[in-house]
Image (cartoon, rainbow, N blue to C red):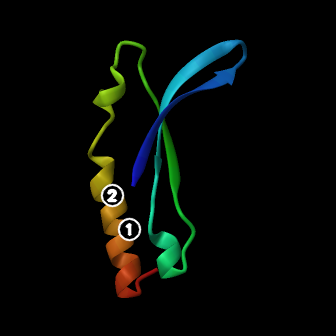
Amino acid sequence: MKVFLHEIKYDNEDIPCWTYLTYGLMSQKQKEIMFTLRRDKEQKPEDYPRNLFGLFEAIFTLRKRGTS
């Protein structure tokens, strides 16, 4: 998984975000997953939530076992 720091422009506003991108699901004949979270302006770039790693790991493990 990779985490990207970026902004999304919407209605003349720059919305700070983190985007999580899976890496490896294509090897299991699945599409990769991209998940974007809005970042509060006072949060530092390195403060990205790490609990999503467990979710994506579970998805990959289930897919690897053949569970869809």
User: How far apart are the two marked residues, 2 and 1, measured between alpha carbons?
Assistant: 6 Å
Point out residue 28 in the picture as x, y percentages from the top left corner: 47, 80
Q: Which mark is residue 55?
A: 2
Q: Residue at x 35, y 77 (%)?
A: 62
Give 68 or 30, whichever is nearer the viewer.
30
Q: Residue furthest bottom?
A: 66
Q: Going 50% across and 47% down the picture, which residue do you hit?
A: 35
Residue 41 is situated, as x and y percent measured from the top left of the image, at 42, 14
Q: Nearer the viewer, residue 46 or 55?
A: 46
Q: Position of residue 19 (x, y in %)?
A: 49, 41
Within the image, what quadrant is residue 61 found in?
A: bottom left
- What amino acid type should be assigned to the residue bearing mark 1? Ile
| Up-down relation of residue 17 to residue 42 (above or below) | below
* SS type, badge 1: helix
Mark 2 surroundings: few (<14), some (14-19) or many (≥20) residues within 10 A: few
Q: Give the labeled residue for mark 1.
A: 59
Asked if the residues shown at circle 2 and circle 1 are in contact, with their CB atoms under 8 angstroms apart, the answer is: yes
Quadrant location, the N terminus: bottom left
Element type where label 2 sits in the image: helix
Q: Which mark is residue 18?
A: none
Q: Residue at x 71, y 12 (%)?
A: 12
Q: Residue at x 36, y 25 (%)?
A: 45
Query: In the rendered view, would you say 31 is above or below 40?
Result: below
